[in-house]
Amino acid sequence: MSSPIHFWFDFSSPYSYIVDEWIDALAARHGRAVERHAMLLGVTFQAAELKSPVAYPLKREYSLRDFARSARFQGLQIRMPSNFPLPTQNAARVFWWQHDTVSPQAAAAWARAAFRAVFTRGVLINEAPALKALAAENGLDADAAEAAWNDPQWKARLKAECDAAIAGGMFGAPWIVVDGEPFWGNDRKAQIERWLAEGPF
Amino acid sequence: MSSPIHFWFDFSSPYSYIVDEWIDALAARHGRAVERHAMLLGVTFQAAELKSPVAYPLKREYSLRDFARSARFQGLQIRMPSNFPLPTQNAARVFWWQHDTVSPQAAAAWARAAFRAVFTRGVLINEAPALKALAAENGLDADAAEAAWNDPQWKARLKAECDAAIAGGMFGAPWIVVDGEPFWGNDRKAQIERWLAEGPF
C-alpha cells in the first residue's frame, strides 16, 4: 500500500465535515489509508495572519450558502449550529486521547460522530454537558473524556499537532496531503482523485 | 434559450483565466449563452474589506502552486507574469469599449486574447506598449484602444460594472451567476454543471 493520505481538520469546519464523509471511500478506491489530524483552525489562521471567511460579512453570507450547497452536492444533510464557528479544542483533545490510547480507528469514529453532531443536529460541542453526552452516546466514558480534555497531556498533544500544521504551511481546513502534495479544501476532491489514479500532474 | 450565465472576472485572476477557457463549452452543452463582465477585483476586495490571497505569504505560496495545478487539471498551460497581480483597468476598459461599440463577441475574443497573453506568455498588460501591441495583434486599432482606455466614457463604464459587482455581493473572481445563484471560483465547475443539468439542488 502506498503512503497514507493525511487529512487535517477542525471540528467547526463545514467543508471538513463534508470531506470526512467522502475521504475514506476515495482512499479505499485507490488502495490508500487515511490518517486524520484534528487541529485548531483559529491557531493556523493566527499564524498566517488570516481570519475565518465568516469574519467578513459579505464572505460570511456567501459561505453559509456555499456550505449548504456543497453538502447537498455530496448528498449530505447539513444544519449549521446556532453558535458558529464553535470552539473545538475539547473535542479535538478527545480525538487525540482516543487516537493514542485506543486506536486511530476509534479516533476516526469519534471524528465522524462529532462532525455529524455539529453539522446535522446542531450540537454545541463547545459546551461540556453536550460534549459529555456525545461521548456517552458513542460508547466513551463521559467522565474520562472530560478528564482527558482537561489533562495537560492531551492539551500538549493537540498543541503539537497545531504546531505541526503551522510548520507544514497550513492556513486552512480541510487540508489534505497526498505524497507530500497539499490540497486545501473540499473542492479539491477531483484533483485529489486524479492524483491518486494517475500520480502527479 | 434559458437565461444567460453571467461570468465576472479580472484579467489578473488566474482562476478567471481557467474559467474563461471552459465556460463557453459548458454553457453550450446546456443551451445557455455566456455574458462576460470585466471588473476590478481590487475594488471588490476593498469594498468587502478583504485582500488578495497572494497578499498573505503562506497563502501566496499555496495559491501559486494551486493556480498551476488547477490549470494543468483543465489541460491548460500556465505561466505566471513576472508582475503579479497586475493592474488591469486598461485591459478591462478595452473590453467594455469592444463590448459596447462592436459586440459582446468581440469583447469575449479580447478577453480570451488578454487572458492567454497574461497567463501563457507573461505579457504585462498593465504596460501601455504591451497592451497596444496586444490590441494590434488581435485586429484592433492600437491607438483607438489606447484612446478608449484613457476616455472618461470607458472609465465610467468600468466603474459602473465594479459598482454592480459590489452591489451584487461579489468579493472575488471568477464569479459566476446562474439563474441568480452565485458561484465563486473555478472550483465550482461541477456544481455549476449540475445546476445547469438538473436545476437548483
Image (spheres, coloured by chain):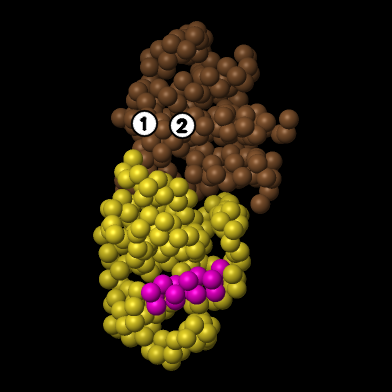
Chain colours: A brown, B yellow
Residue A1, given in percent of the width and then of the height, sits at: 73, 30
Residue A50, given in percent of the width and then of the height, sits at: 47, 48
Q: Please, what secondary structure does the residue beneath circle 1 have?
A: loop
Q: Which residues are magenta?
A: B105-119
Asked if B111 appears above or below B152 in the picture, the reply is above
Identify the residue shown where x is 55% and y is 32%.
A23
Residue B27, given in percent of the width and then of the height, sits at: 39, 58
Identify the residue shown where x is 65% and y is 41%.
A197
The picture quadrant where one finds residue A161 is top right
Q: Report crowding for label 2: few under 14, some 14 to 19, many 20 or more residues within 10 A (C-alpha).
A: many
- Which residue in the structure is indicated by mark 1? A78
- Which residue in the structure is indicated by mark 2? A17
Labels 2 and 1 share a subunit: yes
User: In front here: B183 or A125?
Assistant: B183
* Type of amino acid at the residue the image marks with label 2: Tyr
Mark closest to the chain's N terminus, 2 or 1: 2
Residue A126: numbered disc = none
The picture quadrant where one finds residue A84 is top left
Left or right placement of residue A135 versus residue B103 in this view: right
Q: Is residue B111 magenta?
A: yes
* Type of amino acid at the residue the image marks with label 1: Ile
Q: Please, what secondary structure does the residue beneath circle 2 have?
A: helix
Secondary structure of the magenta portion, mostly? helix
